[in-house]
Image (cartoon, rainbow, N blue to C red):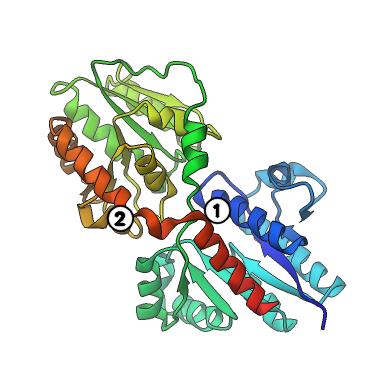
Amino acid sequence: MRQKKVVIFIPSIEKGGVEKNLFIISDFLFKKLKDLTIISASKKAKKKFNKKIKFLCPKSEIWDNFGRNIKYFISVLFLIKKILHNRNIIVLSFQANIYAIIVCKIFFIKIITRSNSFPDDWSNNFFKKFIFKNILSLADKNIVNSIEVKNKFKSKYKINPECIYNPLNKKQIIKLSKHKIKNIYFKNNSLKIIQVGRLSEEKDHYTLLKSLFILKKKINFEAVLLGSGKLKKNIQDFINKNELKNNVKIIDYKQNPYPYIKQADFLVLTSLHEGLPNILLEALILNKFVISSNCETGPREILLNGKGGALFKVKNYNDLAKKIIFYSHKKSLRIKKTKFAQSKMDRFDYSENLNKYYKIVKKHI
């Protein structure tokens, strides 16, 4: 029997951790399999992939501007078209897994799903929970990227996925961090804080800004928010209204954020929820002390319950402010915790985790 061709399904390719892992995993699988197809409604992302990887998408880039639900619908149509043209395929779904599973099971196609986080907004709705539990279990294999997410799927949906941590390319991150950039407003005599992420609700930048407002008269600091998104104007208005513009700057999204992170003392994450935030791992590689919200899921796992950094309660800007002040005076403790976190990072080994993906795909083709 001929070897099945691998199709990666990801309707909306954006600027985040999921996409970063998508590029890494797809490039690796292509090198191993020599034949790979991406199905997406995000045509602009095509140029980011190896030119030899096949890319099925709409002819116009206009669809890049639409929301996820429209992109899901379009990509499902492309998936059905692909299946009707060639039934000898296996699907690796990175997004819209429920839709992908339904299509694949209708046409008797094998499917592997990768879930980046646990859908808490589904778990408390009986109807949605029933759909998710019963459809996700139909996949030939489910993959998640953290033990916390794995345990949630087991306890709430009775599904036992395989955990494969995000593949972390330490050498590349360190290399990219050495690229020269213009000064980013940091001064040598100030505490340098950076936050990296989309300017959107789930990243909760306001908690950091509220904590910085408290700190304004207590310590000398400068902060950079590195990212783009729909809340940029609102966040800038908040900065101006609270007289933080001399302390806080917004820098638009950069494909290479590492030189900016390298200049900071602290990296702060204030997210309401995550999967397994790459940015924390990348900051640790660059020897930066991490302060993160203790959100579901990932930060607690990466920072080893606070032994490898600092955790604060979600949305608690007073707690965050206290931790920033405390650790600003505890350089030796910061170094000790960062080194401890770094000593436990073998579980994110680049080659090992990429090969885990390959072995699962190879087993099913």
Q: Is residue 219 above or below residue 21?
A: above
Would you say residue 124 is visible in this rendering?
no
Would you say residue 147 is visible in this rendering?
yes
Which residue: 33% across, 37% down?
287
Residue that numbered label 2 is attached to: 295
Which residue: 64% across, 56% down?
28
* 301 or 106, nearer to the observer: 301
Q: Is residue 113 above or below residue 252?
A: below
Is 21 positioned to the left or the right of 293 in the image? right
Q: Secondary structure at mark 2?
A: loop
Point out residue 360 in the picture as x, y percentages from the top left corner.
59, 73
Residue that numbered label 1 is attached to: 21
Q: Is residue 294 above or below residue 159?
A: above
Q: Is residue 103 above or below residue 305?
A: below
Specify the quadrant that holds the C terminus: bottom right
Point out residue 190 in the picture as x, y percentages from the top left corner.
24, 19
Specify the quadrant that holds the N terminus: bottom right
Q: Nearer the viewer, mark 1 or mark 2?
A: 1
* 42 or 365, nearer to the observer: 365
Which residue: 44% across, 80% down?
160
User: Which kind of residue does numbered mark 2 sit on?
Assistant: Cys
Q: Earlier in the sequence, mark 1 or mark 2?
A: 1
User: Which kind of residue does numbered mark 1 sit on?
Assistant: Asn
Point out residue 348 in the picture as x, y percentages from the top left corner.
43, 56
Q: CA distance from mark 1 to mark 2?
A: 21 Å
